Image: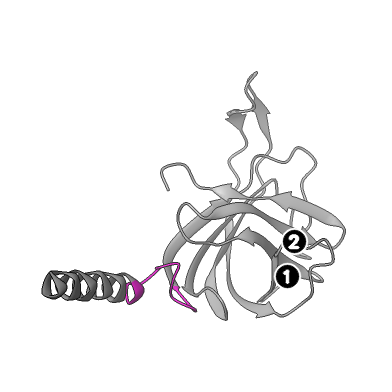
Amino acid sequence: MGRWISIAALVAMATACVGHGRKGSSLDPDPMVESLRIESLYMHRGVKLIAEGLPTRGVSLKLYGRINSAMKGMLILDPNQCSLDVFGDRLLCTRIASRGIEVELRRLTLTDSAGLMRKYFEITGEGLTGDVALIVQGSLLPGELERCYLVVGSVLVPLYLEDGS
């Protein structure tokens, strides 16, 4: 009987160790995100993320790297004006090219005064105006994202997992 308990304990420990070593495992203290894309809904008023050009009416951010330290990615800025249907889906849009900016995200250790355990990532990239940050509540791992938004000056831009993610 004691032998079977020991074997069961070894199997349980081996299973736990295999899960711990996986990329993206929530048990990993600094998991990797290989390719995560988050995006905003259409913004009628738009937001100014770059000094040159039109206001951005849609934002998407593709990220990769270590979640708890530094990530890199591409920030895509869509300046197109659109008409919307009753559900808020885009119908007719102008045909202006989107602009991609290579960005770096660096996590800053700040105290969340509301106690919501949010994480603050400073975003830097060529041409970005002023302070831009990504705020994450939960984790950027699949199934663990609770809330995510860009802070652009005094404007908040809610971001969502891209359809199909």
> What secondary structure is found at the residue carrying circle 2?
loop
Q: Position of residue 116 (x, y in %)?
A: 74, 60
| Residue behind mark 1 | 128
Q: Look at the image and say whether residue 101 sits in the magenta stretch.
A: no
- Residue located 61% across and 33% down the image: 93
- The location of residue 66, given as percent across then percent down, is 49, 77
**Nearest the camera: 164 or 124?**
164
Disc 2: CA contacts within 10 A as few (<14), some (14-19) or many (>=20): many
Residue 26 sits inside the magenta stretch? yes
How far apart are the two marked residues, 2 and 1, measured between alpha carbons?
6 Å
The quadrant in which the N terminus is found is bottom left
Type of amino acid at the residue the image marks with label 1: Leu
Residue 2 % position (x, y): 16, 74
53 horizontally vs 138: left or right? right
**Mark 2 or mark 1, earlier in chain:** 2
Q: Residue at x 80, y 71 (%)?
A: 131
Q: Nearer the viewer, residue 158 or 69?
A: 69
* 135 with respect to 48 (left or right): left
Residue shown at the point (44%, 71%) measured from the top left: 27
Q: Main secondary structure of the magenta part?
A: loop
Q: Write down the region rendered in magenta.
A: 20-31
Name the residue carrying label 2.
Answer: 49
Secondary structure beneath label 1? loop
Figure disc tally: 2
Do callouts 2 and 1 mark residues in contact (Cβ within 8 Å)? yes
Residue 58 appears at what percent x and percent y?
65, 47
Q: Quadrant of residue 113?
A: bottom right
Relative vertical location of residue 84 with respect to residue 77 in this rendering, above or below: above
The residue sitting at the top extreme is 86
The amino acid type of the residue labelled 2 equals Leu
